[in-house]
């Protein structure tokens, strides 16, 4: 008597897995010379950052957001459920966005100029975040770095990469 054997099931190919991560760097300059450099640090994308800036943008939803501004602050780490930057200094800087057709990275750069009253007194900046608007709103992502003293005669140049892989 013959017995039936089960057909061999081939495992499915691994599904492509997309990840989003980010890196940022903050440099303080005076008279064109770098006086402090944070080095590269990883970011923390917020829950609403994923929803508003990525998911809803892919769906062309009316509630979607696009990154337009960068903020610096004097505070602590923004958690995944966070929406604001702790200790945010008074003015956000508009970002310039750049990408290439051969890359999965978008680079946001911003300059915080003390001549434009970015700070009105010396501050110890220690965190950074990306936002859609010049004030208020929900942060896309952010994180902390070793605090650096920023005086009113200094400029902060920040670079923030969002990397898809």
Image (tube, rainbow, N blue to C red):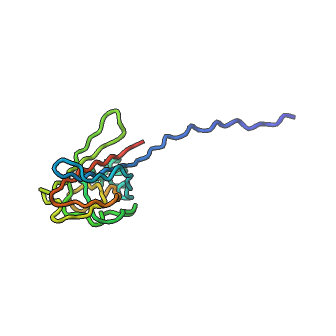
Q: x and y percent of residue 62 in the render?
A: 28, 53
User: Quick check: 11 above or below 75?
Assistant: above
- The answer to which image quadrant residue 85 occupies is bottom left
At horizontal 22% and vertical 60% (from top left) the residue drawn is 150
- The answer to which image quadrant residue 135 occupies is bottom left
What quarter of the picture does the N terminus occupy? Answer: top right
What quarter of the picture does the C terminus occupy? Answer: top left
At horizontal 77% and vertical 36% (from top left) the residue drawn is 5
Q: x and y percent of residue 149 in the render?
A: 25, 61
Q: x and y percent of residue 124 in the render?
A: 26, 63
Viewer-nearest residue: 132 or 37:
37
Picture mark count? 0
User: Quick check: 158 above or below 16?
Assistant: below
Q: x and y percent of residue 82 in the render?
A: 36, 63
- The answer to which image quadrant residue 119 occupies is bottom left
**Residue 57 shown left or right of residue 133 in the figure:** right
At horizontal 35% and vertical 58% (from top left) the residue drawn is 143
User: Quick check: 106 above or below 2?
Assistant: below
Q: Residue furthest right?
A: 1
């Amino acid at each position: 008597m013959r017995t039936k054997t089960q057909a061999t099931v081939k495992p499915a190919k691994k599904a492509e897995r997309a990840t989003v991560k980010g890196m940022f760097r903050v440099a303080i300059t005076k008279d064109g010379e770098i006086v402090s450099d944070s080095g590269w640090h990883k970011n923390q994308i917020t829950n609403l950052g994923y929803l508003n800036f990525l998911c809803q943008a892919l769906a062309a939803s009316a509630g979607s957001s696009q990154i337009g501004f960068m903020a610096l602050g004097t505070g602590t780490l923004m958690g995944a459920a966070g929406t604001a930057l702790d200790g945010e200094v008074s003015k956000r800087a508009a970002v310039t966005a750049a990408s290439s057709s051969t890359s999965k990275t978008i680079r946001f750069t911003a300059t915080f100029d003390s001549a434009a009253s970015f700070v009105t007194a010396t501050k110890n900046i220690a965190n950074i975040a990306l936002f859609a608007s010049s004030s208020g709103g929900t942060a896309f992502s952010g994180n902390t770095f070793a605090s650096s003293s920023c005086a009113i005669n200094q400029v902060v140049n920040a670079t923030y990469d969002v990397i898809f892989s």
